[in-house]
Image (spheres, rainbow, N blue to C red):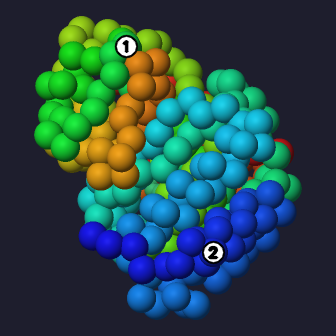
Amino acid sequence: MKTTLRPDVVGALANRIAAAQDGARAIAKLTDEHPGMSVMDGYAVQLELRRLRLSGGHRQTGWKAGLTSRAKMDQMGVGVPSIGFLLESMYYPEGSPIQMANLLHPRVECEIAFVTKARLAGSSCTCDDVLAATDFVVPALEIIDSRFAGFKFDLPSVVADNCSAARYVTGGRAWRPEALDLSTLGVVLEKNGEAAAIGASAAVMGHPADAVALLVRVLDELGLDLPEGSFVMSGAITEAIAVQVGDHVTARFQELGSVGVRFV
Ligand code: OOG
Ligand code: MG
């Protein structure tokens, strides 16, 4: 796949996304102005956004895979998985209050996160490669917040917008990957004490480590690898749920325990 946007346009779009993130102000999806934009153009904008953040003093903790379950693909109307980067500034400890004023229209997702103990790279990375390189897995919540009006986008636009990454929270118990069957873990996503969504980890590409392998293969296409010690989110198991001030959300995972967050 090729890029079509000029470098100055890529730079301007990355700045537009950064300003929308920082000011919590919605913008039109990028393909409204650039209908011919490709998915690779989207990644060019995302990598420029990453460069801006890192040169601004942010530290990267890892990467996320998104749109890796049927529930998410159907909810967003985008049928292709994508990846985004995670920064230390997006991390909130378990139970932390999340300020709604800094977000546009956040939604919460329950995910299984991987922490790696060896470098992963290449165009043929597999589920087994990922499991062998995994130090531990841990339950996580992702708070996504599209910078696009109405939370509506297509693949090139959402890729440019860093796959809607906004915040993430970890909790529960860390497990060695070989100590449990990662494909059969049930989860209940509760909002204010009531079940809002129910799923099982196989919903993520049959096995969440497969989503991490896909992420490594996309990184390879971008000329990047996944360094040892990376934190990787494998994608939402169920659809994302919208939240408002006063809501609290908890994901209760079989074996992995629970992880919660509240919005103020
Ligand atoms: C894109 C991000 C999706 C996931 O886990 O599926 C995502 C979006 O739906 O806004 O993070
Ligand atoms: Mg996610």
The amino acid pointed to by label 2 is Asp
Q: Give the camera-side residue of 169 and 9.
A: 9
The amino acid pointed to by label 1 is Lys
Residue 8 tag number: 2
Q: Is residue 175 left or right of residue 63?
A: left
- How far is the residue under mark 2 from the one under mark 1? 38 Å
In the picture of the structure, the residue carrying the numbered disc 1 is 117
Which residue shows up at 45% across the image and 43% down it? 64
Question: Where 213 sits versus 41, above or below?
Answer: above
Expressed as whole percent of the image width and height from the top left, the position of residue 233 reads 43, 37
Expressed as whole percent of the image width and height from the top left, the position of residue 236 reads 40, 47
Query: Does label 2 or label 1 sit earlier along the sequence?
Result: 2
Expressed as whole percent of the image width and height from the top left, the position of residue 133 reads 28, 18
Which residue shows up at 24% across the image and 26% down it? 130
Which residue shows up at 48% across the image and 27% down it? 231
Tag count: 2
Question: Where 72 sits versus 210, above or below?
Answer: below
Q: Which image quadrant for residue 57?
A: top right
Residue 222 tag number: none
Secondary structure under tag 1 reads loop
